[in-house]
Image: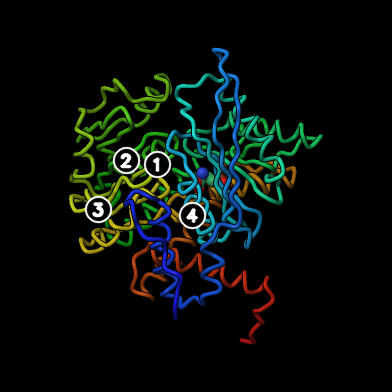
Amino acid sequence: MSYIEPAPILDHANPLDSMMERFHKAAEHLGLDDDIYNVLKAPARQVIVSLPISMDNGDIKVFKGYRVIHSTILGPSKGGLRYDPAVNLDEVTALASWMTWKCAVVDIPYGGAKGGICCDPRNMSTGELERLTRSYTQSMYSVFGPDKDIPAPDVGTGPNQMAWLMDEYSRAHGGTVSAVVTGKPIVLGGSLGRVQATGRGVMTTALSAMAKLKINPYKATVAVQGFGNVGSWAAHLLKERGCRIVAISDISGAYYNKKGINIGKAMTYRNENKGSLKGFDGGEIIPADDFFKLEVDVIIPAALENVINEKNAENIKAKLIVEGANGPTSHKADDILLNNGIVAVPDILANAGGVIVSYFEWVQNRLGFKWSESRVNRRCDSIIKLGFNNVYKISKEYKVSLRIAAYISAIDKVAKTYKFRDGSFTFQKT
Ligand code: GLU
């Protein structure tokens, strides 16, 4: 069988290379035929726009915005919108593919997409961010839609941006369209439990993996890298279940306390300190480079891509990594972790809680009905546990890491669906 090889790897930090390497490996295990390999490899659509925005000082600044739709085979495409200075086409394309695999691995009826605007939201006013979000929405009016492509929050965005997006889309449409975006404020049709959902999924998959590895949560120590929405909620919920969170970090630094960090206090401090842990006194400051060398049982990378790479993977002492972020481990680090017996619950499974509850939000908007938080949490937990058990079973069957097993599960599902929809696949009598 011959495949078109992934593009040569020029830069270890390119997340698209990391995605393609795993895709390629899983495709080989599945014996995926060349035609489908080529269909699934290529993003279905890449839209790039220029967004001229009046800044508060009177200047006009032009921002670059992206929306990449990787696939609509399983349903309308779904995926977050990222505001970050490092946003570029390759990153958004990798993130869009990961959304396809993520939705498939937890069996929700969506394809994958991602949006991004290259900007620095920390240094922009609320007014500037609102104008930018509204302008992006106008440019993407023909791309978005409840049955076409549904954005959500990601790094640098949250309920405010989703509210502006929903409002701008609804104005252009001529009527309120709640289901065009998820992660909205509750009063605008957001789902209870959505804010905590990604961290909750990280907690659930971490506990499932700990059970397999015979790590007792009441004796486990955990380090969480990134203290945004995902990292802070994962830390909070794991602490509630008995784990000791001994280290947390954000761009201001890394904080260590061997007795355990008071996560509630850290969250309050961050909320009152413009989103930053700078000056937090609930732990001693340790050098950022030492973070991944810590003697802990579990590490949760919950910030950006490639923080675990071939340069630092060898130093990791934890037994388990649970990926709250998208793409935190480069493909070159995969083998190092595997050789050292370190288990990684991959991003496309571990952080799927967010998109699962986004799906519930979309369902509630379409039903015109609101679910209780306990119903949301219960259903999210059961979907993600099913996903975990399925991936675990495949990893044993194929003798591969949980990561490759997750890709095998996802690619197999999307490929089979494609064949049905394409008409070249016939029902087999069993
Ligand atoms: N940005 C989140 C992710 O990467 C959520 C996506 C969504 O809810 O559509 O999974």
- Please tell me whether mark 4 sits on a helix, a strand or a loop: helix
State the separation of the CA atoms marked 4 and 1.
20 Å
Q: Are marks 2 and 1 in contact (CB under 8 Å)?
A: yes
Q: Earlier in the sequence, mark 4 or mark 1?
A: 4
Residue 171 percent coordinates (x, y):
76, 31
Q: Earlier in the sequence, mark 4 or mark 2?
A: 4
Judge by depth and name the residue closer to the eye, 240 or 136: 136
Q: Which residue is mark 3?
A: 310
- Please tell me whether mark 2 sits on a helix, a strand or a loop: strand
Q: Amino acid at mark 2?
A: Val
Residue 213 percent coordinates (x, y):
28, 60
Q: Amino acid at mark 1?
A: Ala
Q: Which residue is mark 4?
A: 98
Near mark 3 (Cα within 10 A), the count class, few <14, some 14-19 or many ≥20, is some
| Quarter containing the N terminus | bottom left
Q: Earlier in the sequence, mark 2 or mark 1?
A: 2
- Which numbered disc covers residue 224? 2
State the separation of the CA atoms marked 3 and 1.
26 Å
Q: Which residue is mark 1?
A: 234
